[in-house]
């Protein structure tokens, strides 16, 4: 037995421990671990491949730009999906073009599946326009709803109906112009 | 192995020290091997080809508190986009009302998801504002440092993500986050958090909350793009981060942050 045999034992033990660790890691660690860093690299793919729900304005404007040309309107910068939301696909691209839809993107071939649900109560308007002291002072807000309706209604109709929704006087796409033609 | 005698002791100690030193050096070299090999694999992006230029981004987020009106569209959009469980939200809006008596009233009913009902406070409100909150995607992240299984990590684009297949739901990261942006999803019993809508931004879309914000109070962009809006704002305007004293290096910047904001 050489005089280094005791040291060799240590080396063998350390080597075996190292090999054992490598084997355990190869068996237990996910395949892509360490691909981009100390995490499972495939998760980046999985996280990026989830389905998107909100489509963005460009998606809507592919078909609806001619109808809602709102360049001068107060709500021109409000994204469509702030108020409208489609829980199901609203339209899909197909081979056949629907003449009822003025689709122009991708060759103009869309088929409408679901009507866009629209909440016609006051709530979507009040989410932004009810008076709150925390809102920016310059933002248009309604301090007294009853008074607003009373005064506004007198101007337009001459009679008071406090249960009427905002849409009776205001066009939500062109909020400054009154749909009844009264300023 | 024979036990060595006392006279040879000094020589054997020298030998032992020599061997120990060389052994340590050998082990050091061995531990370096896996690191360098993983470094080479960083450039293997063949698998991400369906995501164009996915590596060439470094994202940042700007919240302009002077524009926020507290409508809650962002919180509703986030819930729809990411299907968060009831009662939990990845992003929320806080209402601050500071009265002339010096009191600061802070509330966030349901995270502001149904907007804010008027709230009676004592005295007159002399200053008020809304502060949207979300994961700050820190560079010096307390949450990923405490993860015992490497389930939470920072992606190459600067987005802090949670790998739900690896997460064991211990909740350390929930405790570690100084911004309270994490929660344990009661359906999967794993940690969940804002991902800046990673599935959207890697496809070139803005996060859902940015997409629906009616006053453009939320701005998202790529710091590597020379003409991006976030870079223009961070370069030219006076921006602030939440809890800067914690040195977490957030990449979510705030414009018009008040001293009352926590």
Image (cartoon, helix red, strand yellow):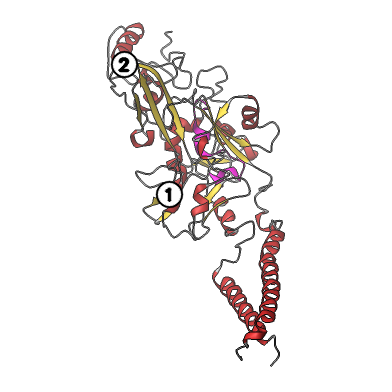
Question: Mark 2 = which residue?
Answer: A145
State the CA–CA distance, disc 1 to disc 2.
42 Å
Classify mark 2: helix, strand or loop: helix
- Disc 1 and disc 2 on one polypeptide chain: no
Which numbered mark, 1 or 2, is in the foreground of this view?
1
Marking on residue A140: none
Q: Describe residue B109's horizontal placement relative to residue B135 as left or right.
A: left
Q: Position of residue B246 (x, y in %)?
A: 51, 39
Region of the chain picked out in magenta, as a range: B197-217
User: Quarter of the image holding residue A11?
Assistant: bottom right
Task: Name the residue nearer the viewer: A165 or B54.
Answer: B54
Task: Name the residue nearer the viewer: B228 or A34.
Answer: A34
Marking on residue B174: 1
Please identify the quadrant where the C terminus of chain B is shown: top left
User: Quarter of the image holding residue B87?
Assistant: top left
Q: Are marks 1 and 2 in contact (CB under 8 Å)?
A: no
Q: Position of residue A53 (x, y in %)?
A: 50, 43
Classify mark 1: helix, strand or loop: helix
Please say whether residue B136 is one of the residues in the magenta stretch: no
Q: Residue lying furthest bottom in this view?
A: A1
Residue drawn at the location 54% of the way across and 24% of the way down: A77
Please identify the quadrant where the N terminus of chain B is shown: bottom right
Task: Name the residue nearer the viewer: A62 or B62.
Answer: B62
């Amino acid at each position: 037995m050489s005089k280094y045999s005791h040291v060799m034992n240590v080396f063998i033990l350390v080597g075996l421990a190292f090999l054992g660790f490598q084997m355990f890691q190869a068996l237990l660690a996910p395949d892509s671990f360490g691909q981009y860093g100390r995490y499972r690299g495939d998760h980046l793919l999985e996280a990026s491949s989830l389905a998107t729900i909100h489509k963005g304005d460009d998606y809507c404007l592919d078909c609806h730009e001619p109808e809602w040309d709102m360049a001068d309107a107060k709500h021109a910068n409000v994204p469509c999906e702030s108020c409208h939301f489609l829980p199901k696909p609203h339209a899909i691209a197909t081979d056949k073009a629907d003449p009822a839809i003025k689709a122009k993107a991708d060759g103009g071939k869309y088929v409408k599946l679901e009507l866009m649900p629209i909440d016609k109560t006051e709530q979507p308007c009040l989410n932004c326009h009810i008076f709150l002291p925390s809102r920016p002072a310059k933002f248009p807000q309604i301090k007294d709803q009853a008074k607003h309706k009373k005064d506004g209604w007198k101007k337009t109709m001459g009679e008071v109906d406090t249960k009427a929704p905002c849409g009776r006087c205001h066009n939500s796409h062109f909020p400054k112009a009154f749909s009844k033609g009264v300023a | 192995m024979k036990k060595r005698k006392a006279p040879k002791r000094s020589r054997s100690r020298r030998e032992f020290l020599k061997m120990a030193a060389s052994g340590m050096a050998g082990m050091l070299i061995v531990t370096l091997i896996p690191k360098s090999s993983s470094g080479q694999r960083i450039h293997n992006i063949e698998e991400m080809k369906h995501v164009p230029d996915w590596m060439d981004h470094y994202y940042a987020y700007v919240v302009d508190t002077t524009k926020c009106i507290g409508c809650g569209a962002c919180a509703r959009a986030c819930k729809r986009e990411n299907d968060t469980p009831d009662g939990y939200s990845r992003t929320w809006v806080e209402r601050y009302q500071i009265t002339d008596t010096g009191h600061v009233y802070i509330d966030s009913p349901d995270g502001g998801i149904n907007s804010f009902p008027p709230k009676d406070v004592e005295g007159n409100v002399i200053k008020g504002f809304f502060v949207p909150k979300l994961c700050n995607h820190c560079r010096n992240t307390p949450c990923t440092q405490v993860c015992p299984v490497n389930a939470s990590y920072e992606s190459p684009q600067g987005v802090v993500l949670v790998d739900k297949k690896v997460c064991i739901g211990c909740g350390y990261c929930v405790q570690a986050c100084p911004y309270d942006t994490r929660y344990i999803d009661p359906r999967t019993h794993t940690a969940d958090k804002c991902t800046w809508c990673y599935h959207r931004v890697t496809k070139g879309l803005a996060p859902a909350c940015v997409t629906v914000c009616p006053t453009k109070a939320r701005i998202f962009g790529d710091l590597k793009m020379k003409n991006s809006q976030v870079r223009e704002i961070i370069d030219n305007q006076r921006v602030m981060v939440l809890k800067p004293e914690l040195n977490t290096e957030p990449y979510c910047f705030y414009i018009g942050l008040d001293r009352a904001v926590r």
